[in-house]
Image: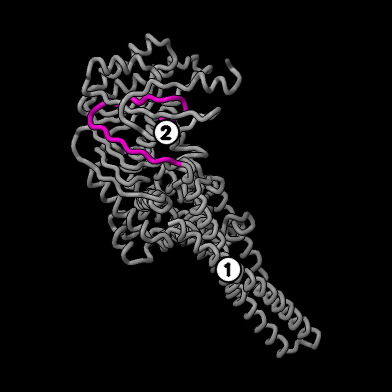
Amino acid sequence: MIPLYEELLPGLNEAKESLSKVNSRFGLIRLFLFIACVAFIIAGFVRGNSIPLFIVGGVAFCIFVFVCVIHKKSKYMEAILDEKIKADSRYISRGKGDYKDMVFDGSEYINHSHDFSSDLDVFGPHSLFALYNISHSVFGCKSFADKLKLKDISKLTKQSIINDQKIVEDFTNDPEFLLDYEAVAAHHSITKMPEALLTLCLRNEKLKSGYKWLYRLIPLIWLAPLVVLFLGYASYVRIAVLVVILINLIIWFCISRLDLSDIFKAGMISKQAEAIKVRVELLLSDEKRRETFVPSYLSETFEDDINSLIKACSVCSLREQPIFALLLNAGMPYDLMCADRLFDWSVKHGKNFMDDVARLGDIESLMSASVPGLIAKVSSFPTIREDKLAYFEGKEMTHPLLDPSKAVSNSVSIDSKSALITGSNMSGKTTLIRTVGIMMVLAYMGAKVPAEKVDCSIMRIMTSMRIADSLEENMSTFKAELIRIGSIVEASSKEVPMMFLIDEVFRGTNSQDRTDGAEILLKKLNKPYISGFMTTHDYALCDRAAETKDENIVFFHFSEHYEGDEVIFDYKLRSGQSHESNAMFLMRLVGIK
């Protein structure tokens, strides 16, 4: 798909350049019309209130307003085009393994105690989230982060994954829609849901009837100045007006003492409501997509909920400026009217609205899940097994975070067994087990995987790779690893299918204890519902396992060869054991003899 984005880019740049020129002309036309309007009106006054000149000035003003409206729409189109170009460029960068243009990297979702996310580079500057996320909303990013963390893996079924795959396939087959959606979403980015909106949605109570009657009846006191005038007391009209204003201001002061401040802030969230609206309109503009997402994801009333919120907020936003608030409330209990409209919306639409926003985030996360299939050179939808055993097969898998021009694909299969992977430093052991974990993460979220084939059962993924000491918690590397391994052992007792991925097991202790501990660990993890990969330099462990002829342990290895002062890796996984080590060779290269 990357060639498609490369083909689109010149046309998009050309269209933006053309539209930019049009907007420049609009700017000059606006300036000319404004000057003409002012000149004709001034000339009308100079020539003794000349009606024809006033008319011409009025016509110029009307044309000026019309041009302003057209110019605003044209500038909006240019802004969307600009975002579309950026989105298109990001797709091209993804295909080249370039992360510098990515907008969000998901660093806020990093959790080092999570089962696997830190070890598999799920979040951070160079991560799956940074590579695949195309959402520009806080709810879309959160939903995608939850999918990558496999937050609801206990609820996953083969059918639920297949359902997600169908939606992802539809998005993958419509890459230009994804570009349009991301462009609109980026222009209307929602980086934070305002507390006022959350408060409003959860309030679920109506304004007290006494306050309702107050703001409806108080405006009638403006009849008083008319009555005074009608009775012939014209000199007292001003006093009557001042009294009415004073009454309204006293009511406004009393209202300000009520606990309504959080509601009035809702006038500030109209921008977010508009941002949600344009997303929904674009998403549901196609009849096929509407049938897919309504009502299975979005409620049939979602569009009405948004429009009602925008109307309520537009009324409320008029009082955001202190001067306007003073003037409006001097005329009537305007704040009470605003509160009534917002309270009423909360009761009728609040809960449904927040549920729909969350589900819109789920849809955006499926859009992000479509990206692997758009940027990978080779990709396929995984086959999901529904049995309770632990099974994984991957054919020609490629780690998606490596430079695509240099990445080497590998194949591996394991069925309710433990695999020991040996090989020299930097030969590819850790990359291989990370690739397996990433294939599973993508598979469970309904995405395509960068592989010719992946076939797996639904398993909990648990890892122990990046182990570091902690001075703050007074924890050594070995203790940190023990805690991590302990959590894997504890999870293994629950008879839930699991895949463990352990890199350099018990690296923080001496060789004898490492071998004994790893042997005990493998026995504890020897269960029909568990599969796993363990990388090691401990050849004594491999020899012991080979001597016992344990059928539940299989061996893989990576190898290399030497050319002068160079060590050459082919990064290809092979069956069997390796007893090679390049540590001394590498130390000699850096002057350690």
Bin the neighbour count of mark 1 within 10 Å (Cα to Cα): few under 14, some 14-19, many 20 and up: few
Please tell me whether residue 418 belongs to the stretch shown in magenta.
Answer: yes
Bin the neighbour count of mark 2 within 10 Å (Cα to Cα): few under 14, some 14-19, many 20 and up: some
Query: Which residue is label 2 attached to?
Result: 431
Q: Nearer the viewer, residue 31 or 174?
A: 174
Determine if residue 415 is in view: yes
Q: Distance of mark 2 from mark 1, alpha carbons?
A: 42 Å
Q: Nearer the viewer, residue 332 or 81?
A: 81
Residue kind at label 2, given as amino acid type = Thr
The residue depicted at 26 percent of the width and 37 percent of the height is 458
Q: Please tell me which of labels 2 and 1 falls first in the chain.
A: 1
Please tell me whether residue 140 belongs to the stretch shown in magenta.
Answer: no
Chosen colour scheme:
one colour
Q: Residue reaching furthest right?
A: 46
Q: Label 2's element?
A: helix
What is the number of the mark on residue 205? none
Q: Is residue 261 left or right of residue 119?
A: right
The residue depicted at 52 percent of the width and 60 percent of the height is 84
Percent position of residue 477, x then y: 46, 17
Q: Label 1's element?
A: helix
User: Is residue 359 shown above or below 525?
Assistant: below
Percent position of residue 320, x then y: 58, 55
Q: Quadrant of the N terminus?
A: bottom left
User: Is residue 15 shown above or below 542?
Assistant: below
Q: Residue reaching furthest front?
A: 564
Percent position of residue 145, x then y: 41, 41
What is the number of the mark on residue 14? 1
Tell us which disc is closer to us: 2 or 1: 2
Residue numbers of the magenta segment: 407-430
Q: Are marks 2 and 1 in contact (CB under 8 Å)?
A: no
